[in-house]
Image (cartoon, rainbow, N blue to C red):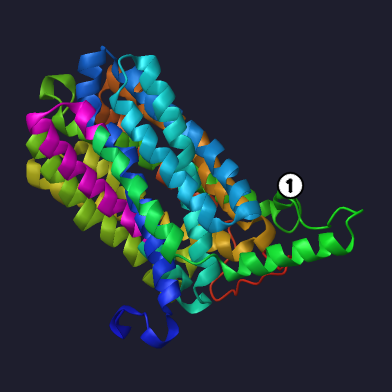
Amino acid sequence: MPASLGFPISQVSPAQRRTLLAAALGWMLDAFDAMLYALVLTHIMRDLGMSKATGGLLGTLTLLASGLGGVLFGFIADHLGRKRALMLSILTYSLCSFASGLATSVLMLAVARFILGLGMGGEWNTGATLVAETWPAALRAKALSIVQASWAIGYAVASFCAGMFLHFANWRVVFFIGVLPALVTLWIRRGVPESEIWQKHHGEQLQTAGQDAGSKVSQPGFWNIFQPPYRKPTLALLFMNFFGMFGYWGLFTWIPPYLSLPVEQGGRGMGVMGTTTLMVILNLFGMLPGYGSFGWMAEYLGRRKSFLLYAGMAAVMVPLYAVARRPWEILVVGTLAAFFGTGLFSGSGVIASEIFPTSVRARALGFTYNGARTLSSISPFVIGWVGQRKGLSWAFFLCAAGYFFSMLVATQIPETKGRELVGADDATDVA
């Protein structure tokens, strides 16, 4: 990793690089499996006789499950280790992607997408926690931005695969290739180390329990994140993420159908290959640099100001995208909307990991990020419902409102730039 990118090689060990790669691969493949649904949604609606509202409802169901999965896998990560939870989450969403291709009814597809959502929600907080606890404070924001940026790569690969396989096969085959990420767990098991901070904390717990087996070990529990001094940042992070995700999931669940549907049905009539090309461009030239740039911006401006900048610009760009008509306008404004509208999420893991103590860090990240996914799970359904009646262009204005409110809530989060992560669970000043 060259120094020109802000990663002095002397400060990064091989173990840290493997940890970063594992978390980035997990998140990339999470995006690959999760976004395949949006990319083949038009074909599923036709074959299974689903309306836009029903199609959006299944997307909502997956997001709802991701919130539950974030807390569930956060519990596993805090008690059994970050590495084990990461592996289990990847296996869950990979196998359920394959199962989605076997669905012969809306109900079967809904069950597969719900369980996939559990793994999808668990991967983010376990991977982000592992990296946050492994990398030094000076490089943490940049490392987590790289992890977040891998989502765009996964989305782009999914767009390419969906376009290619839909050319000579059907949507079921697209879901079948979603089982391939399961193979990554074999490498994680052998080559990725466990978090030393977690191991030290877990060892201290076991030692204390062994010394006094008759008494309960005293340590902060999950509900401590709702007590001072953590209550205000917990709620601020939750709703900051919720409003941002409402904008994101409403926009990016429906962009593929929006681009591919005929103009008379409220789309842009670009067809399969036109949509595929545009989605790849949006991911590689919009989302990817948006995610990746946040870490560098956070080191320059600070975590909070950077989030305000990205959320505010997204609130401006999404309405412009909704009214764009000419192909070059859709391309340029869509790329900028993708840059700012996705890049802001790199900030959530950085801020949350620097606020919460080791004993509840994975669960706290899971709750504030994936709990927000649960709340925002209504977004695909709402945008689909409004799009059915008013048109998707009009519905996208609601996504812009989501980004605007995310910016407002972000004014209440603390600045955490330069904060060290320690194994101790003593409360720190988070005001």
Segment colored magenta: 147-175
Q: Name the foreground residue: 153 vs 205.
A: 205
- Answer left or right for 158 relative to 364: left
Q: Position of residue 200 (x, y in %)?
A: 67, 69
Q: Is residue 68 magenta?
A: no
347 versus 58 height, above or below:
below
Q: Position of residue 167 (x, y in %)?
A: 8, 32
> What type of secondary structure mainly makes up the magenta span?
helix
101 versus 161 height, above or below:
above
Q: Is residue 156 magenta?
A: yes
Q: Which residue is mark 1?
A: 223
Residue 270 seen in this snapshot: no
Q: Residue furthest top?
A: 49
Q: Residue at x 21, y 48 (%)?
A: 157
- Answer left or right for 261 relative to 319: left
* Badge 1 amino acid: Trp
